[in-house]
Each structure stands twice: as structure tokens, then as C-alpha cells.
Amino acid sequence: MKKTSIKEIFKHEALHFTPWLSNNLSKLGSILNKKFELIETEKSIGSKRLDILLKDEDNNEVAIENQYGISDFNHLGKILTYLVGSNANEIIWIAEKFHQVHLDALKWLNINKEDIFFRAISVVNPENNKEKNQEKIFFTEPIVYGDVKEGDILDALNCEKKVFMDKELKKLMEMYESEKPKAHAVQYGVITGSFQYWIWTRDKKRTLFNKYF
């Protein structure tokens, strides 16, 4: 299932998404099998503001850092600020997708900071949420940026056509990225023009190209 931006429903993170999440903690708690109670939103820590501070059923403090889009180093830096500026036993980074390097950083922190647990969670606005229903928003294990799976529906570059991700296309993408390690077959849910051209040049009869594009 293709994911659409959370910003389509919550235009401003601090003004709209953070208050919604603070009133819908059960949605986050359901995937973590925990119950949370709100302590404070927009809590000042040093020069930064922590989006949400919670406590769990064991009375441990939990810090929440929200982010639209794909994880970045700015928000990783904020998380490190909360590491030294709060009493949190757990820090949860919420974004739509995560770069693998940021997931690796959280893994490293979990190994080297045994008194605090770092967690990444993806927030999802499903494509079928045309009516922009907030109830359809859900949380899941971290979605890795650039990681496409069979069954995904992708956009083709410079056209409105939707491309269904089947086993054959996934194999072609893997071949392309193995031949061109710095290239991407898909970026931001869109099939890149360089990948399409690669298929065009390899497929003399245009069978595959016409199948997908």
C-alpha cells in the first residue's frame, strides 16, 4: 500500500500533529503494547523544545520527537539533546520514513546507553484516506526510506501513471542498483527517470518498458 504524507492532514507539526498525538496516545501505545499518560507538550530542554513528554504504566518518563517526512540529522541532534537534558528512560523518534544510517545510530545508542532505550516509529497516512480522516492515521515499525516491496504502488516520473510493484519489477530495480550503487530506482515513492532509461536501453523490444510505463 502506498503511503501519502502526514502533512496532508496535519498542516503544521507543532500546532496540529503534536496536539492530535497527545490526545490519541492509545494509537501509539497499541503498537508498543504500552499505556501512556501525557505530562507535557512543547517542553523546553536547553535551546530545544521536546514535542511530547509522557510517562508509561511503570511511571517512567518517555520523550517523543515528531518529524514529518524522512528522518534527518537535525532531528537526530535534537534526540541527543534530550538524552542529556531530560530524565527520560525512553526516547521515541516518530517520522514517516527513516534513513538506514539513522536507524543504525539508534541501534548504536541502545548498545552504548543501556539506561535509555531509543526507538523509531513510522506514522502512516494511507493512500485510501481521501477524506483526510484522522482516525485512519496509524503507527508501525520503522519504514526504511528507499525500501520498496512487492505490492507497493509507485508513481512513474513525469506522468500520472501508477506502477504496480511486482516480483519482476523488483528484480529489475535490484539489478539496476547493483550495477549503479549510487543510483536510486525509486525516490520519494517516484520511479526515477534514470531507471526508466536503463530499462529502455536494455529492453530492445520495449516489452518491459511498455508493461510498466
Image (cartoon, rainbow, N blue to C red):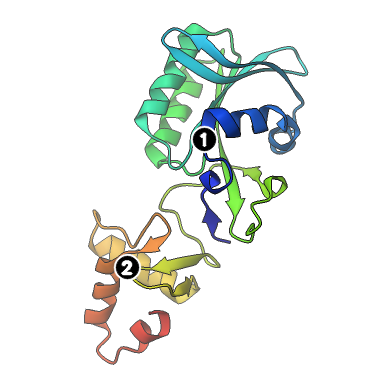
> Mark 2 touching mark 1, by CB under 8 A?
no
Residue nearest the observer in this picture, 121 or 105: 121
Tell me if I can see residue 167 in this picture.
yes
Residue 155 lies in what quarter of the image? bottom left
Task: Inspect the image, locate mark 2, and give the three-letter code of the amino acid beneath it.
Answer: Met
Note whether 206 is above or below 187 in the view shown.
Answer: below
Disc nearer the start of the sequence (2/1): 1
User: Looking at the picture, how far across and down is residue 193, in whole percent?
Assistant: 27, 68
Quarter holding the N terminus is bottom right
Which of the 4 quarters of the picture holds residue 52?
Answer: top right
The structure residue drawn at horizontal position 42% and vertical position 37%, both measured from the top left corner, is: 71
Residue located at (51% from left, 43% from top): 96
Q: Is residue 93 visible?
A: no
In the rendered image, residue 3, in percent from the top left (x then y), is placed at 54, 55
Residue underneath mark 2: 175
Q: Nearer the viewer, residue 46 or 57?
A: 46
Residue at image coords 59%, 13%: 88
Residue type (three-letter) at the residue carrying disc 1: His
Looking at the image, is mark 2 or mark 1 nearer the viewer?
1
Report, in whole angstroms, how far the alpha carbon at label 2 lies from the one at label 1: 39 Å
Q: Position of residue 17 (x, y in %)?
A: 59, 34
- Residue that lies at the very extreme toward the bottom in this rendered image: 205
Tell me residue 207's x, y (percent): 35, 89
Q: Nearer the viewer, residue 187 or 161?
A: 161
Q: Is residue 2 left or right of residue 134?
A: left
Circle 1 Cα neighbour tier, 10 Å, few/some/many (<14 / 14–19 / ≥20): few
130 is higher (above) or lower (below) than 94: below
Residue that numbered label 1 is attached to: 12
